[in-house]
Image: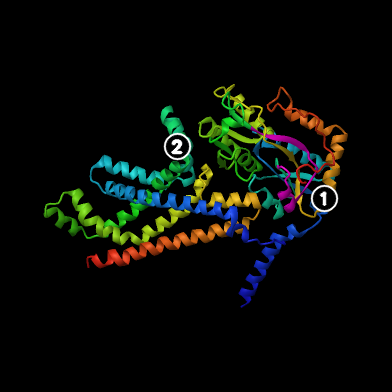
Amino acid sequence: MARKTALVIAAAALVAAMFGSALAADTLADVKKKGVLVAGVKDSTPPFGSVDPNTKEYVGYDVDFIRAIAKKAGVKAEFQPVTSANRMPMLQEGRVDILAATMTKTPERAKQIDFSYTYFLTGQKFLTKVGTVKSLKDLEGKAIGTAKGSTSEQNVAKAVPSAKILSFDDYPQAVLALIQGKVIAVTTDESILAGQLGKLEKNPASKGKFEIPDVQISEEPYGLGMRKGDTNWVKFVNDTILEMEKSGEAKKLFDKYFAPDGDNPMKRGTFKITADERGIK
Amino acid sequence: MNYQFDWAVVTSGKYFEWLVSGVVVTVKISVVSIALSFLLGLVIAVMRMSRFRPVYWFAHGYLEFFRNTPLLVQIFFWYFGSYKVLPDAVNQWLNAQGFEFAAAVIALTIYTSAFIAEDIRSGVRSIPKEQMEAARSAGFSYVRSMFYIILPQAVRLTIPPLINQFLNLTKNSSLAMTIGVAELMYQARQVESYTFKGFEAFSAATVVYVGLSFAITGLMTLYDRKVLQPIKVR
């Protein structure tokens, strides 16, 4: 009997531990108390989040935003790799404090979690073999690759209903399928495609054979994800990134990762971090 | 956690249709792979028992290799790896057909056949060796004694472990989603990513897998009881 009671208590403690952190409503206070900010980031999606093969450190645009936020809060940043499919549960279960994982703000997602202001603006395009795709028409009835659980999948299904969508676990596999001709294009946000194209360009075997044609099917505002109703924390993060825009740090970060002569050439255009509601309205 | 359950998501409408189409694909993969892996398993088992050394070595190597590598690796091998060794024309033809389904069936068939072959072999070993001797002295060749006398008895004894392998195969078919085959798990994840109702979607998938498993067990048991047992040699 005593053993049974002990078991029940242990089980209850386990459940409490699982949900405990998820219930805590003030992550800012929590993070400051722990001295550590745990962030969910991508680990194979340069230039946003990846592991530097030499230093084994996380690097990328998303990662640097987290480092800046951690610095502002006066705590250490710790990184936890997430995928497009598991990032929302990871956040909701309290295993990470914030998501900086190339996540597009959408009204459906905004019902589940809170987003920061847009910290990066991109659009969904296609990565293809040179000359194969000139317009959306060229994609009709063809197989198109993307990653599971992403908005890319839903957008392309709407834009090219006759296409056959093949969702892989992550983008490198989708790109491999493209190289082997199993799909005619890989579709997702231009920024991610630019990173994959950069890798293809570095490889002599595929150099000059792939391109991102000027075919855009959606606007994708990226937001940092936080648990619903975590008001103090959301405000702290928003204030921090607005400040980064004002001080020019945000632009510097953009230029660091998306310079025209770098691995991921992109233009920032007129984009600035502002108190916007892109994507969630 | 104040999670709002919404079972309507998976019991009607667009998402229900997705799940149903996933069930259809899962059943298709499973049925085709079960049939093929049983036949291939029979052949490998016979080869494994052959006294002709090269055949024996081939079967032995096949068993050890495919039993001892992860299924996920094998699926990737057939889907991505085959590209390197096949001629371009074949690759283009395969890609035009939608190679995902075939690659999943090939991987599942070969992987499961290795286990089935071992189960059948242990069934054969439980048949008294006098049966083979009697068959041979009655003028049957080795292969004919196997197929007419020994295997029919051995397969009956092998039904329970075979059920296990078929159940495993059905559940293993969920790994096909990693190469973009739109089977049940793929669709469940799809529903989750559109609706964030992961709990409902995966519960529905669980119910279907349990149902399929019961159906396989039931059918095999029925077959055993109605068809095989009455003609079983005592």
Query: Are the numbered discs 1 and 2 placed on the same chain, yes or no?
Result: no
Front of the two marks 1 and 2: 2
Q: If the image is split into quadrants, where does the N terminus of chain A sit?
A: bottom right
What whole-number distance in Å separates the C-alpha atoms at marks 1 and 2?
51 Å
Task: Check the image and tell me how it is coloured.
Answer: rainbow
Viewer can see residue A226? yes
Identify which amino acid the numbered label 1 is placed on. Answer: Trp
Viewer can see residue B86? no
Q: Residue furthest left?
A: B138
Residue appearing at x 51%, y 59% in the figure: B208
Q: Name the residue beneath numbered marker 2.
A: B97
Residue A207 is situated, as x and y percent measured from the top left of the image, at 58, 22
Q: Is residue B188 left or right of residue A91?
A: left
Residue A239 is situated, as x and y percent measured from the top left of the image, at 86, 43
Q: Name the residue beneath numbered marker 1.
A: A233
Q: Chain of mark 1?
A: A
Residue in the foreground of this view, choosing between A12 and B216: B216
Question: Magenta part of the protein: which range?
Answer: A103-125
Tell me, yes or no, whether the highlighted magenta stretch contains residue A123: yes
Q: Residues within 10 Å of mark 1 (few under 14, many from 20)?
A: many
Q: Secondary structure at mark 2?
A: helix
